[in-house]
Image: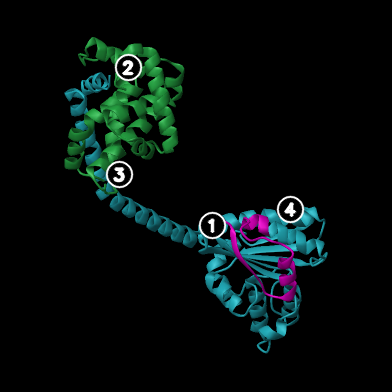
């Protein structure tokens, strides 16, 4: 019986066709896996490095684009606040020029908001905290390239007007563009451009006046002193000194310089 | 990974052994071809050295038995029974050889393995226990029961087992 069993199993064998197909299959698999083992890891590493590099460059470029200042909006009520705006109209940095400004910023998170929304939030905060008196003055300056500047001025005129009228205050708003030099000089003296222009105008009629001496006074008070010396302009709203405002002549003549009473808008 | 020369050598030496294991477990050509190729594919991917040819053969037998059992776990194969094509193979068996083989194929799978490994390949119960990963006593029991079942099926023809 064992003999028959052996004979029977002896006759069972792998056919040539099966062996041949298997040999071809193994050959293909060996080639395929060898190719992958030798070449693929190298390409994979290169792809990973390239992706990482691309991601880093993209991140760097995006970060640089997003955090590069393209415009500056400065507000002076008495709280004096500066907003740094990027190309996407978002506020990327804020700074206070006085304690009141710091107090307002402490209670209003405006970073990464649009500059319009940021100004609206700050206006509402300053009005509700009583910083804007009935006959007060809200000075807002914008420094940007000419195209953006026009749009920003138009937008800010609306935002400030809506805020003032919404709170039924009789305060006036003075919104105008400034040059990069004015903004830079103002920030150098740690005041807003509007305050800087008011003080330099006062200095033109009273050379003894210093920036330190004017600190703590409102723009309206400084302009009042200028008028007391026979300088300045009629009304509450004054123009920047000639040297600074020459560039803006066309703008001021063209009423880029905003002038409004809140409740009238 | 082993090279093509090693693959060809293994195929030449062990193709028939693997085919026999496929025969006692699988009913149709497609399954046989799948398992057959799978076993040699596993061989070229197995990078550990073998201590001897006997070790290499035992390894292939174990892989072939496991691969054959695995194929039965497939949902489709479990639920759709295929025709038994084994009897259509051109193996040219004599009548008494065919009846013995037919009796072996009617045994439960585990008994088929021990009968084949013991009576054809000549492994002892101890060696079969190692190949199948079972206890020696289990192999003795399976061999004993397989013999009895074959005796029942073949009657007086079982002389010599």
Residue segment shown in magenta: A89-118
| Disc 4/disc 1 C-alpha distance (Å) | 21 Å
- For label 1, the residue is A148
- Subunit ID for the residue under disc 3: B
Label 2 packing within 10 angstroms: few (<14), some (14-19), many (20+) = some
- What's the residue at 18%, 28% (across, down)? A20
Q: Secondary structure at mark 3?
A: loop
Q: Nearer the viewer, residue A149 or A242?
A: A149
- For label 4, the residue is A162
Q: Colour of chain B?
A: green
Say yes or no: labels 2 and 3 on the same chain: yes
- What's the residue at 41%, 20% (across, down)? B148
- For label 3, the residue is B46
Q: How is the image coloured?
A: by chain
Q: Check whether the beta carbons of the residues at disc 4 and disc 1 lie within 8 A of each other.
A: no
Say yes or no: labels 3 and 4 on the same chain: no
Q: Secondary structure at mark 2?
A: helix
User: Going by the image, does B9 lie left or right of A116?
Assistant: left
Identify the disc placed on residue A43: none
User: Going by the image, does A187 lie left or right of A9?
Assistant: right
Chain letter for cyan, please. Answer: A
Labels 2, 1: front one = 2
| Disc 4/disc 2 C-alpha distance (Å) | 109 Å
- Dividing the picture into quadrants, the one containing residue B145 is top left
Q: Is residue B134 visible?
A: no
| Disc 2/disc 3 C-alpha distance (Å) | 40 Å
- Dividing the picture into quadrants, the one containing residue A76 is bottom right
Q: Nearer the viewer, residue B65 or A83?
A: B65
Labels 3, 1: front one = 3
């Amino acid at each position: 019986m064992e003999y028959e069993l052996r004979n029977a199993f002896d006759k069972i064998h792998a056919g040539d066709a099966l062996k041949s197909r298997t040999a071809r299959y193994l050959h293909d698999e060996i080639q395929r896996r060898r190719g992958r083992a030798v070449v693929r890891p190298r390409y994979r590493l290169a792809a990973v490095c390239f992706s990482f590099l691309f991601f880093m460059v993209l991140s760097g470029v995006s970060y640089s684009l997003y955090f590069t200042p393209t415009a500056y909006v400065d507000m002076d009520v008495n709280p004096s606040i500066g907003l740094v705006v990027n190309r996407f109209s978002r506020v990327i940095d804020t700074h206070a020029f006085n304690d009141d400004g710091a107090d307002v910023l402490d209670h209003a998170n405006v970073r990464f908001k649009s500059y319009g929304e940021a100004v609206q939030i700050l206006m509402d905060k300053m009005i509700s905290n009583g910083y804007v008196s009935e006959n007060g003055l809200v000075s807002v300056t914008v420094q940007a390239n000419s195209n953006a500047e026009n749009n920003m001025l138009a937008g800010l005129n609306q935002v400030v007007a809506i805020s003032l009228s919404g709170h039924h205050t009789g305060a006036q708003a003075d919104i105008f563009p400034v040059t990069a030099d004015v903004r830079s000089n103002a920030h150098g003296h740690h005041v807003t451009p509007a305050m800087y222009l008011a003080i330099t105008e006062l200095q033109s009629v009273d050379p003894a006046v210093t920036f330190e001496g004017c600190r703590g006074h409102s723009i309206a008070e400084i302009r009042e002193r200028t008028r007391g010396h026979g300088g300045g302009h009629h009304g509450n709203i004054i123009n920047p000194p000639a040297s600074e405002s020459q560039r803006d002549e066309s703008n001021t003549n063209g009423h880029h310089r905003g002038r409004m009473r809140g409740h009238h808008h | 990974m082993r090279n093509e020369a090693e693959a060809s050598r293994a195929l030449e030496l062990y193709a028939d052994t693997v085919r026999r294991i496929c025969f006692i477990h699988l009913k149709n050509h497609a399954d046989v071809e799948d398992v057959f190729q799978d076993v040699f594919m596993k061989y070229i991917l197995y990078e550990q050295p073998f201590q001897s040819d006997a070790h290499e053969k035992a390894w292939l037998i174990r892989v072939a038995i496991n691969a054959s059992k695995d194929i039965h776990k497939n949902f489709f194969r479990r639920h759709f029974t295929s025709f038994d094509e084994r009897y259509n193979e051109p193996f040219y068996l004599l009548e008494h050889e065919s009846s013995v083989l037919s009796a072996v194929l009617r045994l439960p799978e585990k008994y088929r393995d021990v009968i084949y490994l013991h009576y054809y390949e000549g492994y002892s119960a101890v060696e079969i226990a190692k190949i199948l990963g079972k206890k020696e006593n289990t192999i003795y029991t399976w061999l004993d029961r397989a013999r009895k079942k074959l005796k029942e099926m073949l009657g007086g023809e079982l002389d010599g087992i």
